[in-house]
Amino acid sequence: MIKELITIITVNYNTSDFVEVQLDAFTKLTKNKFKFLIVDNGSNDKNLLYLSRALSRFNNVWVYYRKQSFAGSIGHAEALDFLISKVDTPYFLIMDADAVILRQNWDDEFINQINHEIKVVGAPAPRGSFQPKGFPFTYVVFFETEIYKKLNCSFMPIFGMESKGFDTGYLIHEIYTKNKFKALCFDDHTHKCDRDVFYGKVRCSEYYWPWDQENILSCHFGQGSTSVLAKYSNCWYFQVPFLSLLIKKFLGTRDRRSWISKTYNIINS
């Protein structure tokens, strides 16, 4: 019997529609056998029902239900550390629920980038953040399991210091660098900072291999997937009294639906 080569892990918090997109993408685009582990971090009943119905179509998924001790980065990091403790495959991939990989046989491509120096592959930190440049963030990040566990890493941030660069996974860069391991980052084209390609005017980040700027590799919908809508806060309509929240919710819902639709178009093409 062929064993799984890769474990894919994600955290769900009222993002079941995104998780379903991920599973459809991985089922169609992954070459090697994989398992998919999910932690639900306390979603509402409606979202849990959606998740249950979505997962009924797949047979390689394991779901763990837990309550967060703290909201935000602490709860997310706790869930990631919990899931990583369950990994027993040679490689594992961490995905934000609202991120997706869009390449046929992506798993072989990722594995081929791992060598005696490069042990991590993934999406870079967002522009303007305090996260280390040139090292993958938690949106999409691929690890060699043996090295990760040997280094005894953790994704836990420092409580109260998240906005100053001590956010989820901040220690991993330091630990890997100290042990002379390197990482490979995707190129990030963030709308509307660069260009509109596959996702048009939807506010999101498209990722590409540094040597292939024509064929999309991955995409991250980004902040706003859980109705926080932070990515709309720097727009002029954020200042409109009384209407700003309604406007942001409208734009967030519109972009969310459009992102999912465009993602399926890419997957199915």
Image (cartoon, rainbow, N blue to C red):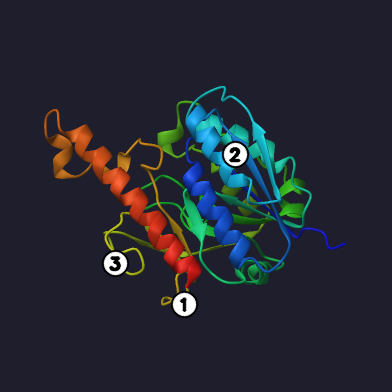
Q: Give residue 78's position: percent from left, percent from top.
A: 61, 32
| Residue drawn at (43%, 66%) of the image | 265
Residue, disc 1: 212
- In the rendering, at what x and y percent does residue 34 appear? 71, 57
Near mark 2 (Cα within 10 A), the count class, few <14, some 14-19 or many ≥20, is few
Name the amino acid, label 2. Ser
Which image quarter is the N terminus in? bottom right
- The mark nearer the N terminus, 3 or 2, is 2
Task: Report how far apart the C-alphas of labels 1 and 3 lie in the structure.
Answer: 16 Å
Q: Amino acid at mark 1?
A: Asp
Q: Along the line of sight, which residue is nearer the eye, 106 or 43?
A: 43
Q: Is residue 259 found left or right of 43 in the rendered image? A: left
Q: For the residues carrying marks 2 and 1, which lies nearer the camera in this image?
A: 2
Picture coordinates of residue 213 (x, y %)? 42, 75
The disc placed on residue 261 is none
Where on the picture, by quarter, is residue 42? top right
Count residues near mark 1 (Cα–Cα under 10 Å), then give few for <14, some for 14-19, many for 20+.
Answer: few
- Residue 227 at x, y = what percent? 36, 36
Q: Which residue is mark 3?
A: 196
Q: Amino acid at mark 3?
A: Asp
Residue 189 or 44: which is nearer the viewer? Answer: 44
The answer to whether residue 243 is visible is yes
| Camera sees residue 217 | no
The answer to whether 250 appears left or right of 47 in the picture is left
Disc ID at residue 52:
2
Of 13 and 168, the residue lying toward us:
13
